[in-house]
Image (cartoon, rainbow, N blue to C red):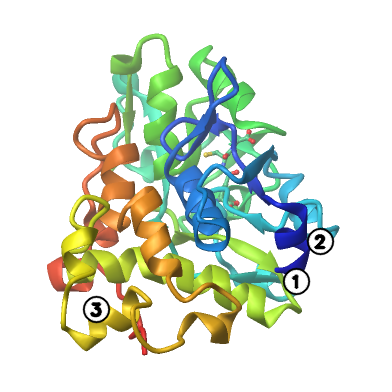
Amino acid sequence: MQTIVSRGNLICGVNSVLPGFGNVDSAGEFSGFDIDFCKAVAAAIFDDPNAVEYRPLTAQERFTAVQTGEVDVLIRNTTFTLGRDGDVGLDFAPVTFYDGQGMMVRADSGITTLEDMDGARVCVQTGTTTELNLADQFRARNLNFEAVVFQESDPALAAFEAGQCDGYTTDKSGLVSSFTKLSNPGDFVILDVTLSKEPLGPSVLQGDAQWADAVEWIVYATIQAEEFGITSENIGEFEASDNPDIRRFLGLESELGAGIGLPNDFAARVIRAVGNYEEIYNRNLGPDTPFNLPRGQNALYTEGGILYSPPFR
Ligand SMILES: N[C@@H](CCC(=O)N[C@@H](CS)C(=O)NCC(=O)O)C(=O)O
């Protein structure tokens, strides 16, 4: 935290080729669901969502960048797994997006299940959880396949589009995002099958518990704000509230922030800058975007999903 504060900005490891999650446009502007969580962290620390330096990282580069301290936090559609928590040496903040691996095929291929893919060629990106899940799922079903492996996802998708593979597999969020890159998206479908659990969330280098706590509670602040119904638009009304839970959450009483090295009003800063979880979700993935992704598991626990914040007290 001291390093970040004295540097004057947050270095956030991100994706730059995944529209909806982490993307950079021709003007160099970064946007997406993950990018908004980088902004949330910067807002909590600096009260400025733009105090971020984005470091685009491929799937392969991302963990080294955390291990060497090149980035302060990695927010790049990264799955929380035991191996990454353990061997790789990361600490994960709460899941921001519950996902699962999917499979895209040509609409006219006649493939509707994985069983229809015996002997198929599948385009897949290396350095991801995707490769192992593909092998596990085909092995469990006694199916043969040939993995056609790529270092980056755009070439994998392009090879699939060009007919070099029968299927393209990655996180379903990644598949949905890749529809924006296909010349004829209508020619392709995502199978109604989920190959794995892919809980995606921010991570930091293991060994700095307070920094990990800070990132963790910044994510929870977005979820808790949605639970309270506090948005970037109505936060002013809540600041006049007598409700002690709300007053603590917004840092109007008690000293909760200090315990995790953050300003006491960090949650209020986050909400003013990027909004609550629902606002972040809808801005990047909701009905007014090309993705129109239903909330599904990413709804609050009170609305049929599994998002839940521990109490701010
Ligand atoms: N969630 C998986 C997959 C993450 C991943 O890197 N996905 C690909 C496809 S959606 C990606 O972002 N590729 C972008 C690139 O080429 O760097 C993981 O953590 O391993």
Question: Does the rendering let one see residue 158?
Answer: yes
Please name whichever residue, 163 or 304, is drawn nearer the observer in this view of the structure.
Answer: 304
Report the residue at 30% width, 26% height from top: 110
* Cα–Cα gap, marks 2 and 3: 37 Å
Residue under label 1? 89
Q: Earlier in the sequence, mark 2 or mark 3?
A: 2
- Within 8 Å: ligand 1 and the Cβ of disc 3? no
Please name whichever residue, 83 or 221, is drawn nearer the observer in this view of the structure.
Answer: 221
Instruction: Look at the picture and state if 249 lies above or below 313.
Output: above
Which disc number belongs to residue 246? 3
Report the residue at 62% width, 45% height from top: 52
Please name whichever residue, 128 or 111, is drawn nearer the observer in this view of the structure.
Answer: 128
The disc labelled 1 sits on which kind of residue? Gly
Marks 2,1: beta carbons within 8 A: yes
Q: Position of residue 82 (x, y in %)?
A: 62, 74
Q: Position of residue 295 (x, y in %)?
A: 23, 52
Q: Is residue 186 left or right of residue 51?
A: left
Residue under label 2? 67
Report the residue at 57% width, 48% height from top: 76
Q: Is residue 242 left or right of residue 57?
A: left
Q: Is residue 99 left or right of residue 257?
A: left
Report the residue at 45% width, 56% height from top: 141
* Cα–Cα gap, marks 3 and 1: 35 Å
Q: Position of residue 235 (x, y in %)?
A: 23, 60
The disc labelled 3 sits on which kind of residue? Ile
Question: Does the rendering let one see residue 138?
Answer: no
Q: Earlier in the sequence, mark 3 or mark 1?
A: 1
Image quarter of the C terminus: bottom left
Q: Earlier in the sequence, mark 2 or mark 1?
A: 2
Density class for disc 3 (Cα within 10 Å; few <14, some 14-19, many ≥20) is many
Marks 2,3: beta carbons within 8 A: no
